[in-house]
Image: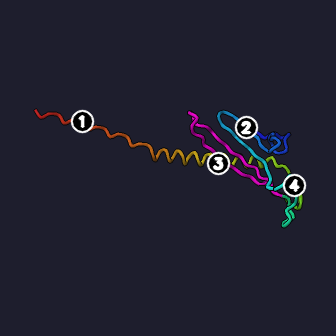
Amino acid sequence: MNIDPTQPWGLVIDYAGRATVLENGHTLSVRVFDNSLGYTLERDPFTGQYPSVQVTAEFSKAGSNGDATLRGYGLAVVEAKDGVPAVPDPTAVQRAVAAALADFEARRSAYAELCATWAPAPEPEPTPEPAPAP
């Protein structure tokens, strides 16, 4: 995935903090959100800090016949510091996508191992009939 340096988060996101990239049968979904409860960004009354921003990524690939989809998930957190709201960090998207790809690969290898375990045993070769005695 190429990061767009003209965008604050490195890719174009919609008003709800979502972005989707489709390429070669793979889908990458990114979501940027904070954990505030209201519409306005306010400091936490206990810590005095603004909420952190979570960047999640989901990497998925549909199976060849369309009835199975394998997914990988990643998360990156941008912390607010010194009483200032978190600022956009384009590397957060890269970190979330890298984590999603690593999770996807771990799930893929586990699935391949499971399939290999459940593969039926090959049929034994039949023993040839003994030759008749002369």
Query: In this figure, which residue is indicated by the disc labeled 3?
Result: 102
Under tag 2, what secondary structure?
Answer: strand
N-terminal-most mark, 4 or 2: 2
**What is the spatial separation of the Cα atoms under label 3 and label 1, in whole angstroms?**
50 Å
Query: In this figure, which residue is indicated by the disc labeled 4?
Result: 41
Q: State which region is magenta.
A: 51-79
Q: Quadrant of residue 20?
A: top right
**What is the spatial separation of the Cα atoms under label 2 and label 3, in whole angstroms?**
18 Å
Q: Residues within 10 Å of mark 3 (few under 14, many from 20)?
A: some
N-terminal-most mark, 1 or 4: 4
N-terminal-most mark, 3 or 1: 3
**What is the spatial separation of the Cα atoms under label 3 and label 4, in whole angstroms?**
33 Å
Q: What residue is at 81 percent from the left and 40 percent from the top? A: 14
Q: Main secondary structure of the magenta part?
A: strand
Query: In this figure, which residue is indicated by the disc labeled 1?
Result: 128
Q: Amino acid at mark 2?
A: Val
Q: What residue is at 19 percent from the left and 36 percent from the top? A: 130
User: Residue 133's x, y, as percent?
Assistant: 12, 34
Which sits in the foreground, 36 or 89? 36
Which sits in the foreground, 27 or 109? 27
Which sits in the foreground, 68 or 27? 68
| Rendered view: 51 above or below 25 | below
